[in-house]
Amino acid sequence: MSRVLVIGAGGVSRVVVHKLAQNTDVFTAIMVASRTRSKCDAIACDIQKRYGVTISTAQVDADKVAELVSLFKAFNPQLVINVALPYQDLTIMDACLEAGVHYLDTANYEPRDEAHFEYSWQWAYQDRFKQAGLTAILGCGFDPGVTGVFTAYAAKHHFDEIHYLDIVDCNAGDHHHAFATNFNPEINIREITQEGKYWESGLWRVIPPLSVHRPIHYPEIGNRESYLLYHEELESLVKHFPTLKRARFWMTFGQEYLTHLRVIQNIGMARIDEIDYNGQKIVPIQFLQAVLPNPQDLGANYTGETSIGCRIAGVKDGVSKTYYIYNNCSHEAAYRETGAQGVSYTTGVPAMTGAYMLLTGQWSGAGVFNVEEFNPDPFLAKLAESGLPWHQIIDGDLEL
Ligand code: NDP
């Protein structure tokens, strides 16, 4: 018997709420609350039609701790799943501490005025969550999220020491728009336009944005040009797996996407500072978001699939070994099931799975945790039965 509150009503929230509603043996009361209540009502209405499950809805400004606390006290959840934006992570964590509620999110905190992500702000909550006897699970989407669990699974079952980690993220889908982002455009463009960074021999190596790339072969998809990016799970993985000599993250982009991105940057539309427009303050990237396709509306015509996994090399019983663990997810199948495309699906299913682990007691502990700190086995079993089956290739060619 567990009450769970989801904050945010975007594409990821839609999938999370669908998956919660498919597991009412554990999630016995579900609420979705966000800035715009009509979006929560639309999700609730869809769920009622598909599963006959009633979802409560509410309006909340998640930038305001007091509003959150009074909502938490009124609904009285055991767990809050934060799938609003990374800007709200700290206010929601503050409210969880005040109301005595566990916390889970899918993206680490970012300050609004700095395109910069790192775990320090959220790791600083460690003592407060510990003292309160509460659990905070950070980064429980796909990447970050499943990629950390995949790494933990590899380290537990296949290696004595892992030395090289390459996380490879391919979206081979086609949404039939000239340019659109697969999740919140502001967060997505901030992530991609920052400097690349990877871990090697105990140091972070910094490279100009998108300057290192190469074709990588993805299962069922083929070769796709893949770009070395900084991605937040690298920070926690090199901390929790100190045997890593190198850790990198690769993501595919098409030429059309990169051309649009370059133009957007060159004309100043990726700026995150305020400018004066006809006497009104606007942030160019937020204005851009208002005219771009809404990621939630991409699903209907999205074809193709995503493929995300971890390619790992290390030693087992004194012998060198390679291991590749991955999931492929079809955009069409995700849309048929939930009304959302594959990128929202691959984020929302792991968020529900993490919530399921916590509320069934299979993941527990007081404090702030990254997903790779927990037992990967029950998570990966539940993930596979919840729509994201995974595959492994042992001693194949990692290419990288
Ligand atoms: P959307 O932009 O579609 O949805 C965000 C939702 O948050 C919207 O409903 C929005 O409200 C709501 N929101 C924003 N600000 C506030 C606020 N102050 N108070 C209350 N609600 C607010 O994003 P996505 O669904 O695509 O992504 C959700 C999260 O998932 C993001 O943090 C993203 O970074 C993360 N993510 C993680 C991935 C992973 O693999 N780990 C991959 C993809 C995404 P409104 O509707 O009014 O705008």
Image (cartoon, grey):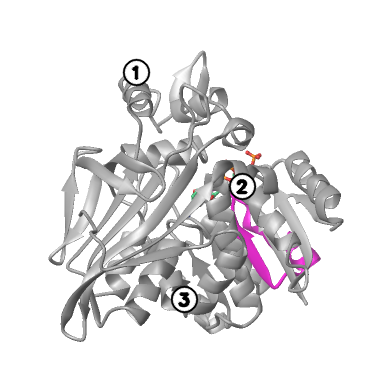
**Is there CB contact under 8 Å for labels 1 and 3?**
no
Considering only vertical position in the picture, is 84 above or below 310? above
Report the residue at 49% width, 25% height from top.
288
Amino acid, disc 2: Ala
Q: Nearer the viewer, residue 141 or 163?
A: 163
Please give the label number shown on residue 334. 2
Q: Nearer the viewer, residue 151 or 33?
A: 151
Q: Quadrant of the C terminus?
A: bottom left
Report the residue at 19% width, 41% height from top.
212
- Residue 376 within the segment the image draws in magenta: no
Q: Position of residue 53 (x, y in %)?
A: 84, 58
Task: Name the secondary structure under disc 1.
Answer: loop
Report the residue at 55% width, 80% height from top.
363
Task: Name the secondary structure under disc 3.
Answer: helix
Q: Position of residue 78 (x, y in %)?
A: 70, 73
Where does label 1 land, which residue? 267
Q: Nearer the viewer, residue 114 or 342?
A: 342
Give the Cα distance between marks 2 and 3: 24 Å
**Is there CB contact under 8 Å for labels 2 and 3?**
no
User: The magenta stretch spans which residues?
Assistant: 62-85
Most extreme residue toward the top is 278
Dot 1 alpha-carbon crowd within 10 angstroms: few under 14, some 14 to 19, many 20 or more: few
Dot 3 alpha-carbon crowd within 10 angstroms: few under 14, some 14 to 19, many 20 or more: many
Q: Nearer the viewer, residue 301 or 163?
A: 301
Considering only order in the chain, which callout, 3 or 2, is on the residue closer to the N terminus?
2
- Residue 65 within the segment the image draws in magenta: yes
Please give the label number shown on residue 376. 3
Amino acid, disc 3: Pro
Disc 2 under 8 Å from ligand 1? The reply is no
Q: Position of residue 261 (x, y in %)?
A: 36, 27
